[in-house]
Amino acid sequence: MLVYKIDIISELEKVGINTTVARKTGIFGQDTMRKFKNNDTNISLEILNRLCFILEMQPRDIIKFVETPEDEEKYAYK
């Protein structure tokens, strides 16, 4: 399972992007901002690319993989 390593909303606010700014500029939609708030990592690579650019980070700075029993059950090659 992918999880955020950082608080996305907090990091965006540090660079001056809140929900209103994101919506007005079109940089992130309301649904995407909701996902960030709810720690939902089901985002597109385009959104991840934007985060990397805006936050001046690499993907590995933003997300990480944490193995869960569900992952083992779904994806393990047997």
Image (spheres, rainbow, N blue to C red):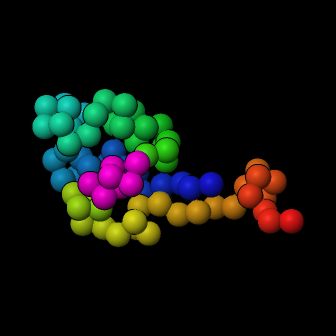
> Residue 23: where, in percent of width, then height?
20, 32
Q: Left of 43 or right of it: where is 74?
A: right
57 is higher (above) or lower (below) than 3: below
Q: Left of 42 or right of it: where is 27?
A: left
* Residue drawn at 22 percent across, 57 percent down: 54
* Residue drawn at 49 percent across, 47 percent down: 41
Indicate yes or no whether the magenta region holds residue 38: no
2 is higher (above) or lower (below) than 60: above
Quadrant location of the C terminus in the rendered image: bottom right
Q: Is residue 51 visible?
A: no
Q: Left of 77 or right of it: where is 4?
A: left
> Residue 63: where, in percent of width, then height?
47, 60
4 or 29: nearer the eye?
Answer: 29
> Residue 57: where, in percent of width, then height?
30, 67
> Residue 4: where, in percent of width, then height?
48, 55
Q: Is residue 43 visible?
A: yes
* Residue drawn at 28 percent across, 34 percent down: 29
Q: Left of 43 or right of it: where is 51?
A: left
* Residue drawn at 38 percent across, 54 percent down: 45
Q: Which residues are magenta?
A: 44-51
Q: Residue furthest right?
A: 78
56 is higher (above) or lower (below) than 19: below
**Most common SS among magenta residues:** helix
30 is higher (above) or lower (below) than 69: above
